[in-house]
Amino acid sequence: MSRRSDQAARRLAGAAPVFAALGDATRLGVMARLCQEGPQSIAHLSEGAGVTRQAVTKHLEALSAAGLVRDHWSGRERIFQLEPRRLELARRELDRISDQWDAAIGRLQAFIEEEQ
């Protein structure tokens, strides 16, 4: 394996937990709410989530383990907020994949034009 492909594999391995955590509809919904509404308590995030507060807590723990959210205590409430650095990592990997697809499509288009 070349050094370049080894680096790419390490980057993807680092981003994989982020994508796995975002692969669940409930967790993705929690992330969207945190993005739109800012830091929130578990009680607030549970409202309208369609799952129990305990389930939301487990989803938040999974998001925290992936580095996507962080929490702090405010009195008796545990407040969760986005961790933008991990989202930026995922966005960069998606941008790289998009660039690779664009390059592959460009090569295919050039090949087709040469054959005509």
Image (spheres, rainbow, N blue to C red):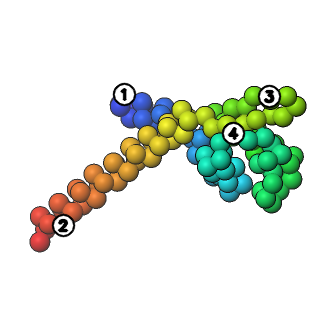
Type of amino acid under label 1: Arg
**What residue lies at 30% left-to-right and 54% top-to-bottom?**
102
> Gap in Å between the C-alphas at discs 2 and 3?
60 Å
Q: Earlier in the sequence, mark 1 or mark 3?
A: 1
Q: Quadrant of residue 8?
A: top left
Secondary structure beneath label 4: loop
Q: Nearer the viewer, mark 1 or mark 4?
A: 4
Q: Circle 1 sits on which residue?
A: 3
Task: Pick the quarter of the image with the N terminus.
Answer: top left
Distance Cα–Cα, label 1 vs label 4? 40 Å
**Looking at numbered disc 4 in the image, what kind of residue is underneath it?**
Pro
- Horizontal and vertical percent position of residue 114: 11, 64
Is mark 2 in CB contact (under 8 Å) with mark 4? Answer: no
Q: State the residue in front, 16 or 60.
A: 60
The crowding category of the residue bearing disc 1, from other C-alpha atoms within 10 Å (few below 14, some 14 to 19, many at least 20), is few
Q: Which callout, 3 or 4, points at the residue further toward the start of the chain?
A: 4
Pointer 3: residues within 10 angstroms few (<14), some, or many (20+)? few
Secondary structure beneath dot 3 equals strand
Q: CA distance from mark 3 to mark 4?
A: 11 Å
Q: Give the vertical position of 29 relative to 7 (above or below).
A: below
Q: CA distance from mark 2 to mark 4?
A: 51 Å
Q: Which mark is residue 39?
A: 4
Residue at which label 2 appears: 112
Residue type, label 2: Ile
Q: What amino acid type is highlighted by mark number 3?
A: Trp
Provide the secondary structure element on which disc 1 rests: helix
- The mark that comes first in sequence, 1 or 4, is 1
